[in-house]
Amino acid sequence: MSVILQVHFPFDGPFGDEMANAMTALAESINQEPGLIWKIWTEDADQKQAGGIYLFDTRANANAYCKMHTARLEAMGVTGIRAAILDTNAALSAINKGPFNSTTS
């Protein structure tokens, strides 16, 4: 069963295209994380927050990434990090067009 990692934290920017330009190398490096299936980057310039929703193959891989990522953010001075690791329900998600297939459910 795949697991979701949700991470959100206060962020002063950049947002939008500027964020994409500034974070491309980081995004590419995240693809190398053990067990990562995909990540959706999230941002809210009005609320000054950013984060992501990740799909991992196992809870252990999601937990390891969460610990590393939290430490990385804290080293950059970020506080107020919120993270949750949740199991997925592929059968119900499929009804709602969730991005699951036989290799990620």
Image: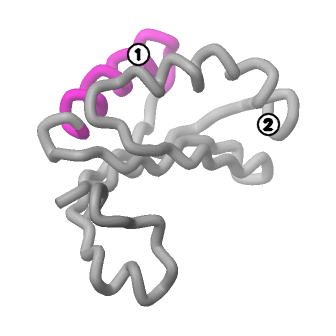
Look at mark 1 in the image and give the residue it sits on.
Answer: 72
Task: Tell me the element at label 2.
Answer: loop
Which residue sits furthest front? Answer: 102
Residue lying at 24% horizontally and 46% vertically, measured from the top left: 57
**Residue range corresponding to the magenta coloring:** 62-78
Residue 68: image quadrant is: top left
Q: How many discs appear?
A: 2
Q: Is residue 93 left or right of residue 91?
A: right
Residue type, numbered disc 1: Arg
Could you tell which of marks 2 and 1 lies nearer the N-terminus? 2
State yes or no: residue 63 in magenta. Answer: yes
Viewer-closest of 79 and 44: 44
Residue lying at 42% horizontally and 47% vertically, measured from the top left: 54
How far across and how far down the image is residue 19, in percent? 77, 29
Residue lying at 47% horizontally and 27% vertically, measured from the top left: 31
Viewer-closest of 94 and 51: 94
Look at mark 2 in the image and give the residue it sits on.
Answer: 15
